[in-house]
Amino acid sequence: MVRQKRTAFYLSDRTAITAETLGHSLLSQFDGITWDRINIPFIDNVTKAQAVLKRINQASEQDGHRALVFSTLLKPEVLALIKQANCQVFDYFETFIPAIEEELRQPFARMAGRSHGVQHHLSYFRRINAINFVLAHDDGVNPKYLDEADIILVGVSRSGKTPTCLYLGLQYGIAAANYPLTPDDMDTLQVPATLIPVQDKLFGLTLTPEQLHLIRQERQPNSHYASRAQCENEIQWQEALFHRFNIPFLDTTGISIEEISTIILDRCALKRKLYGA
Amino acid sequence: MVRQKRTAFYLSDRTAITAETLGHSLLSQFDGITWDRINIPFIDNVTKAQAVLKRINQASEQDGHRALVFSTLLKPEVLALIKQANCQVFDYFETFIPAIEEELRQPFARMAGRSHGVQHHLSYFRRINAINFVLAHDDGVNPKYLDEADIILVGVSRSGKTPTCLYLGLQYGIAAANYPLTPDDMDTLQVPATLIPVQDKLFGLTLTPEQLHLIRQERQPNSHYASRAQCENEIQWQEALFHRFNIPFLDTTGISIEEISTIILDRCALKRKLYGA
């Protein structure tokens, strides 16, 4: 069977991040179609809209199916032009704003880029500070200041600590530190001494030995470090440690950084310091 | 005037990231309301939904206005329960899926977590590799391998290079390096020698001297480094450099990391290596 090929456009006056999130979430619910996805941000005048209209028509013609367009276009004249193209338009504001206006009994601001722009100085600084914190406390550096962390992720090498910390900082403003569990720690079933004073902030990341093996192979192919046996030993040891000291932990196999981060926020009842920044 | 206080709920079977992004984008279009925003992820059964229903009713009662609920709930029985609460529900799937089903002539998969889960091994590795690349090439370390970068951000200290690189890596899988322009470089109006072989990959980040001063004050209050005069000198020098060598650059004052990243992708025609991962 030949897969249907279609084009999806994500259009916006500003970044098109919201349009992309919406479209991606909807399209991921349909199988068997190969999508060509085209982001076009900053469509803030009619001249640009005309060029986009042409691109949409070309895509629809080439595909033999009309394109789907997901948009957060705020200028009525821009949206009106796009609707003349051979496509199906899902405009996010047009769909939902009227009902919200009615509920809140006020008109909407029709201001572009409110969602992903910098509205608040304070939240900008919080975000930058959180990222700086993550970088300064990556991989167990600066253990002196671990007590300033909101959370400390622990796990063996390549268990996903760093990307998760970065996501927690970037997206939620959480001061996330991480500390590696190393083969040197494996002589005993004890929490590394540095971590004892901050034990209530620990959260463990684990994964299947198979997955760890795959990830380490990518980094140091055919090393002792990447071997199935070594991965199995380390995972077995760290999970025993988590159980013994009641350290909450999560098996991250097959789940994304976004999901890992949300689960951690939820389980640890961490308060996010940024909202949709 | 007393600000109206209302509650917004972001509900989902999985992370609620889509519900949050979309709800935040809509609510940012309305001024003068203080929002209490509550994320509740992983509502995947009726028991959990009943507890959420109670929370919504409590919030609506306390506020004296019914809550707004933004959801990506896939289980019809869960969504039906939430709709019994005293609130206005905006469900993305319910709103948009039927028209897409009709257009694509197939039913949707009704699978939770497709948008922010890990669908593709390859894209997971790309993402992790991009983050590793960013960390390994932060602040001019490893200049030997700069030619492997998709893009190299340049700018004076605190111009936002690191957070932007991290966002480019995390969100789009772009191998983004960054290299600092320092006062030592300011003796001449020349590109630092290390960067000459990779000059076509450079992109400059600049900002107003006032904003740079504010950011540096936060870091080293009342230092020469943070002084207005020093900030002005450095900005003037770097912008002259960007002009002289035709290095594309962006004034990032007052725009967010998301916007900066999107503008860079757009201007440099960089191909993203991840999609809505």
Image: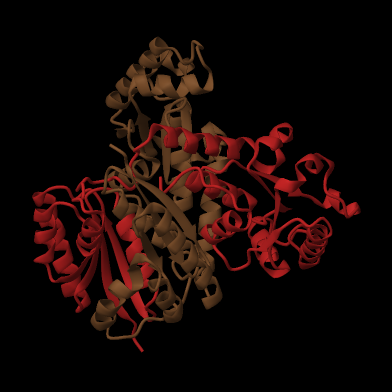
Chain colours: A brown, B red
- Residue A118 appears in the figure: yes
Check the picture and name the quadrant holding the N terminus of chain B.
bottom left
Rendering coords of residue B232 (x, y %): 79, 66
Please say if A274 is above or below B113.
Answer: below
- The single residue placed furthest to the bottom in the displayed view is B1
Would residue A53 appear left or right of B165 to someone viewing this image? left
Q: Quadrant of residue B211?
A: bottom right
Rendering coords of residue A148 (x, y %): 48, 46
Please say if A260 is above or below B48.
Answer: above
Check the picture and name the quadrant holding the C terminus of chain B.
top left
Q: Quadrant of residue A86?
A: bottom left
Q: Residue at x 81, y 64 (%)?
A: B236
- Residue A276 appears in the figure: no
Q: Residue at x 67, y 62 (%)?
A: B250
Please say if B94 is above or below A209.
Answer: below
- The single residue placed furthest to the right in the displayed view is B188
